[in-house]
């Protein structure tokens, strides 16, 4: 971090600042120029509040040189994070480090028949994990809110039947007690900056699928991952699911550049959700191929056995047949894709 002092900075204030920085364990490299003095801070500046420094009379400007995230930063952890999800039938599902997983299932669990039918179909096609929402974050309080505890029970049933590990969303820490049999906790886009929820899942031992917020930068996404990791849970999977732009033809705009960029700056696996990114089922296939071409570690795709009757997100759901076609094409371009077999 670099602090540019004001031209006529009060020497006493400057001394107070330097003393305070020293008390925080920061060493100072001072360069006196013709017009300005620059303080180069040496040490761990992650806890230093830039706004606090900017509010000081003697400070003209402050610039962070190093990223404020440490645990998620590839600079400090050059190797890819590899997350293993145990399965009943033997080999674990491995996420990260060059594997390509497909998480598939309905937006919401709607009935035993629906989740079991979809789970069987996606497993048959080659999905490695099952998704399904039991607690649903809906824009309208009058819309279907999910089956809640009963939905979790049905997900367990579908897991038992297919052997597929399950990814499902938590919206409030109080729901976590129901998640014992769930394999990956999803934090939805709307909760990416629900810091209390992030801290709570940081105390859990289960992997977390963290979705990018509707209007959040990649740095903010990584700071949210840092919240979870700082709590002791380093099993974080990032998910690019589209961001809000001025475009209204699609539900969101899929930021494909996030994939290679995240891979450069973080060691965490990156999956892509083309369903919520586009909101239109016919776009899911091409965008899935694009995500694979960009180096994604996997996909999260909504599949419904009867999209026209879906209680949530029908227009973006693939039929099991369309999903099967997509997986076949993905397998063709990713011949070494891990399929759990
Ligand atoms: C979901 O995956 O069910 C979901 C609600 O997605 P998002 O949080 O990305 O909108
Ligand atoms: Mn959905």
Image (cartoon, rainbow, N blue to C red):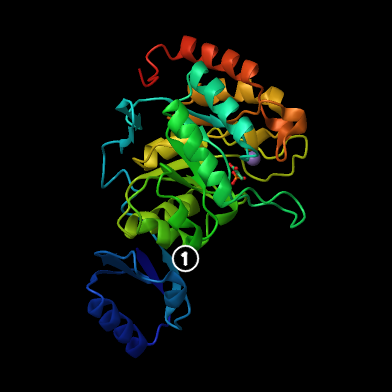
- Quadrant, the C terminus: top left
113 lies left or right of 139: left
- Quadrant, the N terminus: bottom left
230 lies left or right of 215: left
Mark 1, other Cα within 10 Å: few <14 / some 14–19 / many ≥20? some
Task: Tell me which residue sits at (45%, 42%) in the image.
Answer: 238
Is 221 in front, or is 131?
Answer: 131
Task: Tell me which residue sits at (59%, 33%) in the image.
Answer: 115
Is 114 in front, or is 225?
Answer: 114
* Mark 1 residue CB less than 8 A from any atom of ligand 1: no
Q: So how many labels did they put on this image? A: 1
Image height of 99 relative to 235, above or below? above
Task: Tell me which residue sits at (61%, 40%) in the image.
Answer: 109
Q: Quadrant of residue 245?
A: top right
Q: Which residue is mark 1?
A: 196
Is 190 in front, or is 65?
Answer: 190
Q: Position of residue 154 (x, y in %)?
A: 54, 40
Q: Position of residue 264 (x, y in %)?
A: 38, 37
194 lies left or right of 12: right
Q: Position of residue 280 (x, y in %)?
A: 72, 30
Is 267 in front, or is 324?
Answer: 324
Ligand 2's quadrant is top right
Q: Position of residue 301 (x, y in %)?
A: 57, 30
Task: Tell me which residue sits at (41%, 52%) in the image.
Answer: 225
The answer to whether residue 136 is visible is: yes
The answer to whether residue 6 is visible is: no
Which secondary structure lies at badge 1?
A: helix
163 lies left or right of 133: left
């Amino acid at each position: 971090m670099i602090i540019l002092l004001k031209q006529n900075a009060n020497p006493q204030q400057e001394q107070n600042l330097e003393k305070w920085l020293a008390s925080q364990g920061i060493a100072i490299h001072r360069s006196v120029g013709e017009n300005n003095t620059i303080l180069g801070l040496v040490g761990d500046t992650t806890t230093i509040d830039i706004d606090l420094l900017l509010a000081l009379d003697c400070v003209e400007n402050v610039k962070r040189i190093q990223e404020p995230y440490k645990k998620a930063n590839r600079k400090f952890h050059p190797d890819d994070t590899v997350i293993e999800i145990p399965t009943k039938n033997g080999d674990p599902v491995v996420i990260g480090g060059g594997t390509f997983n497909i998480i598939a299932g309905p937006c919401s669990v709607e009935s035993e028949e629906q989740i079991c039918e979809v789970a069987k179909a996606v497993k048959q096609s080659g999905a490695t994990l099952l998704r399904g929402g039991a607690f649903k974050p809906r824009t309208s309080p009058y819309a279907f809110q999910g089956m809640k505890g009963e939905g979790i029970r049905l997900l367990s049933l579908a897991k038992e039947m297919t052997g597929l590990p399950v990814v499902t969303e938590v919206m409030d820490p109080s729901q976590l007690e129901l998640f014992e049999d769930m394999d990956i906790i999803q934090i939805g886009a709307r909760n990416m900056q629900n810091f209390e929820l992030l801290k709570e899942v940081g105390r859990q031992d289960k992997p977390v699928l963290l979705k990018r917020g509707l209007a959040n930068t990649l740095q903010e996404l990584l700071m949210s991952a840092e919240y979870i990791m700082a709590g002791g849970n380093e099993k974080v999977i990032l998910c690019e699911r589209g961001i809000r732009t001025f475009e209204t033809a699609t539900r969101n705009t899929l930021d494909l550049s996030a994939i290679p960029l995240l891979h450069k700056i973080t060691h965490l696996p990156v999956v892509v959700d083309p369903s919520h990114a586009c909101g239109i089922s016919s776009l899911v296939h091409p965008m899935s191929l694009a995500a694979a071409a960009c180096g994604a570690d996997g996909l999260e795709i909504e599949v419904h056995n009867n999209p026209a009757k879906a209680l949530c997100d029908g227009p973006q759901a693939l039929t099991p047949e369309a999903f099967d076609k997509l997986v076949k094409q993905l397998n063709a371009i990713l011949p070494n894709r891990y399929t759990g077999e």
